[in-house]
Image (spheres, grey):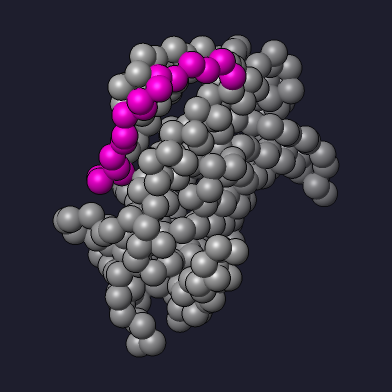
């Protein structure tokens, strides 16, 4: 993570593609006014958010409406020469209306896969097959990728496996059988171990020196009905940082708390003409 982000020289690029082609705006050549708000969690339900753009070209507005297939939107944003992917997903809704003398186009985006929502998979495996072979095959039939956590392990199925149905049911069965959880992040399946441990290597430091702009807020979340254990964490706000991802481990360095936490949820918000660009994160204790 870059040292000492500063809230100026903000840069962004929006790319929209569809069956009829694609277009981009942002940067110095096409600096349209935008605002955005995107949310991500480690749940397997779709992430979502919205982007508003003012005075989009009429042919580009028409493309959002007239495509037979849903368009795909990617937002990259950051500071100076360092921009990273903030959100990528399918356009689920768009509308254009007058805003004073300007045209305002509102675009809602779902971080999920059309293949995952609409397509079935057909699987048949002999006894002794490893669950990873099954999830790899299901993802392969959809033409998507899976990112596995650093210590994810799968068991073999003694009785074999036959299945015809939605792919997300396969991923859920695999995770339930192996103590894992999964989510969709920017068009990829992400699987991790429940009660995961911190992976080896360098983790991100969140502090006033690296862009934290408010003091952490301590939160307490009710635990499961089975255990009743409470989950302790912190809500943290910093300058926009797309390098930190869901399920990353970070080191929180503040006056009220110091320690390693897992990123449970992220919200990115910003406006290209006013206010701060922020990343709000909910950090949970390690292993949760």
102 shown above or below 95: below
20 shown above or below 250: above
Residue 205 percent location from the top left of the image: 28, 67
Residue 116 percent location from the top left of the image: 56, 25
- The magenta-colored residue range is 149-165
Residue 170 percent location from the top left of the image: 50, 28
User: Visible in this render: residue 25?
Assistant: no
The residue at the point 78 percent across, 35 percent down is 96
Picture quarter with the C terminus: bottom left
Assess whether residue 153 is covered by the magenta stretch.
Answer: yes
The answer to which image quadrant residue 188 occupies is: top left
Q: Residue furthest bottom?
A: 255
Q: Nearer the viewer, residue 133 or 71?
A: 133
The residue at the point 25 percent across, 64 percent down is 3
User: Visible in this render: residue 168?
Assistant: yes
The residue at the point 62 percent across, 46 percent down is 49
Assess whether residue 58 is covered by the magenta stretch.
Answer: no
């Amino acid at each position: 993570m870059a040292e000492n982000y500063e809230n100026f020289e903000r840069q962004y690029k929006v790319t929209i593609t569809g069956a009829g082609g694609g277009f981009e705006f942002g940067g110095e050549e096409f600096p349209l006014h935008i605002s955005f708000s995107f949310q991500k969690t480690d749940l397997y339900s779709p992430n979502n958010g919205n982007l508003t753009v003012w005075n989009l070209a009429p042919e580009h507005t028409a493309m959002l409406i007239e495509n037979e297939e849903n368009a795909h939107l990617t937002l990259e944003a950051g500071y100076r020469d360092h921009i990273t992917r903030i959100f990528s997903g399918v356009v689920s809704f768009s509308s254009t209306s007058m805003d004073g003398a300007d045209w305002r186009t509102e675009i809602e985006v779902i971080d999920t896969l059309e293949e995952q929502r609409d397509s079935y998979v057909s699987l048949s495996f002999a006894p002794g097959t490893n669950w990873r072979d099954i999830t790899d095959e299901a993802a392969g039939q959809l033409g998507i990728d899976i990112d596995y956590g650093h210590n994810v392990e799968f068991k073999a199925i003694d009785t074999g496996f036959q299945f015809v149905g939605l792919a997300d049911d396969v991923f859920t069965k695999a995770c339930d059988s192996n103590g894992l959880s999964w989510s969709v992040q920017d068009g990829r399946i992400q699987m991790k171990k429940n009660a995961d441990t911190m992976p080896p290597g360098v983790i991100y430091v969140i502090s006033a020196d690296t862009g934290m702009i408010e003091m952490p807020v301590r939160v307490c979340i009710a635990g499961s009905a089975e255990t009743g254990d409470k989950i302790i964490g912190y809500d943290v706000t910093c300058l926009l940082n797309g390098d930190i991802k869901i399920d990353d481990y970070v080191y929180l360095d503040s006056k009220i708390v110091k320690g390693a936490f897992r990123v449970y949820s992220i919200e990115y918000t910003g406006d290209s003409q006013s206010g701060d660009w922020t990343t709000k994160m909910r950090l949970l204790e390690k292993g949760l």
